[in-house]
Image: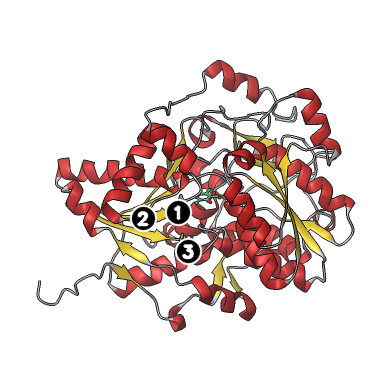
Amino acid sequence: MENEKKIPYKIYLEESEMPTTWYNLRADMVNKPAPLLNPGTGQPMTAEELGGVFCEELVKQELDNDTKFYPIPQEIRDFYKMYRPSPLVRAYCLEEKLQTPAKIYYKFEGNNTSGSHKLNSAIAQAYYAKKQGLKGVTTETGAGQWGTALSMACAYLGLDCKVFMVKVSYEQKPFRREVMRTYGADVTPSPSDKTQVGRKILAEFPGTTGSLGCAISEAVEVAVTNPGYRYVLGSVLNQVLLHQSVIGLETKAALDKYGIKPDMIIGCAGGGSNLGGLIAPFMGEKLRGEADYEVIAVEPASCPSLTRGKYAYDFCDTGRICPLAKMYTLGCGFIPSANHAGGLRYHGMSSILSQLYDDGFMEAVSVEQTSVFAAARLFARTEGILPAPESSHAIRVAIDEAERCRESGKEETIVFGLTGTGYFDMVAYQKFNDGEMSDYIPTDEELAKSFATLPEMN
Ligand SMILES: *Cc1c(COP(=O)(O)O)cnc(C)c1O
């Protein structure tokens, strides 16, 4: 068509077109996500109780189901400008390779040093900690992207940063650790003997390679026992999805520039922050009945919280010291198989996404890690970017859907989130390249065991 604008490989936004507000999807949800509960009383956590652990402004955001738009403070917008807007890429080369009539786009969040979308929330959380006059923040990191992002944000603002890194990653990814230390963070392998809860877990499970839930317990303990410190979390929480809405808002603005309406939006789901952010404005339209999109969450078959989990109140951490969240969960005692290399190891899922999934507004699929790495390799060889294993879950399903379009001849428009790069995941890539990677799918029996760790109230 003569008038049809040729879609460029990369759709960029001007600085002036960048979002000035975050979008709070909860405001458009009829069934709101269930509140966090105090494990002692079974009552909803109050702002005062949460304030002992989290920064004040972040508590406000966490509890706010009603305010639709939050202005992004100017300082955060300025920081965003160093690496945003992130490109929305038309995957022409992948389409060609797959010989599909589908039109594939990906929003690439790996173009900053931390290598993932996590920086979008890290800078926001560090900013509010700084504004509150705190000395520093504590956190956990699994694969290492969140810890790196937070270290960068803290270095920028002059805050102290204490990171508990899941032991298996700490050992597998020494360079990730050095990046954090370069940015000034203090990095400890978890479980450690620095905390009461760490010592308890070590005594109970000697030789454990750790889990996110366990590192969370340690980081929270350090935050509440050190004056001037608060705990920050890189995923799962409502506030994190709020900050990550910048991904979806930019994506929508870029698509709107060319009049493109996606049929399908795909994202990987660990705790749900990138997916929740990517889909936010689209899901808002869907909830308000203005448009319809197929939304697909992709998770590892080895840690299948949405596809095989229970929708129940559960602890956010293994140590059972955090509040209870109602979410799709495998049980806070779930520790993914040690052969699982591809990230997305968290036992639960964002309450917002859990509610949307339970209400039928989105679908979920699980994929096995060898097929995920096969997709990663194909993507690297066609689009050039070396994807993070987490992101490659979304690539896998985008490719599957594009191949379905080839069979059916449908020209669907697919948008997926490419959340980061995989430079620090070369041990996993090496296993895959050497043919030594295997798949692990927990049996129903194993899951029954971890479901037994759900709190009794359910
Ligand atoms: C942390 C991370 C994820 C998963 O976390 P979500 O909160 O589910 O988005 C996905 N991809 C990358 C690159 C990550 O660093």
User: Is 310 left, or right, of 15 in this rendering?
Assistant: right
Residue bearing the label numbered 3? 247
Hey, what amino acid is under mark 2?
Ile
Residue bearing the label numbered 2? 385
**Mark 2 touches mark 1? (CB < 8 Å):** yes
Q: Is residue 32 visible?
A: no
Q: Residues within 10 Å of mark 1 (few under 14, many from 20)?
A: many
Identified at 45% across, 54% down, the residue is 421
Hey, what amino acid is under mark 3?
Ile
Q: Residues within 10 Å of mark 3 (few under 14, many from 20)?
A: many
Looking at the image, tell me whether mark 3 or mark 2 is earlier in sequence order: 3
Q: Position of residue 161 (x, y in %)?
A: 74, 59
Given the current orientation, which residue lies at the most extreme bottom position? 16
Looking at the image, tell me whether mark 2 or mark 1 is earlier in sequence order: 2
Given the current orientation, which residue lies at the most extreme left position? 2
Distance from disc 2 to disc 1, alpha carbons, whole Å, reads 7 Å
Hey, what amino acid is under mark 1?
Thr
Distance from disc 3 to disc 2, alpha carbons, whole Å, reads 19 Å
Q: Give whichever of 139, 13 is nearer the camera.
A: 139
Tell me: residue 60, above or below residue 141: below
Disc on res. 421: 1
Q: Quadrant of residue 155?
A: bottom right
Tell me: residue 374, above or below residue 128: above
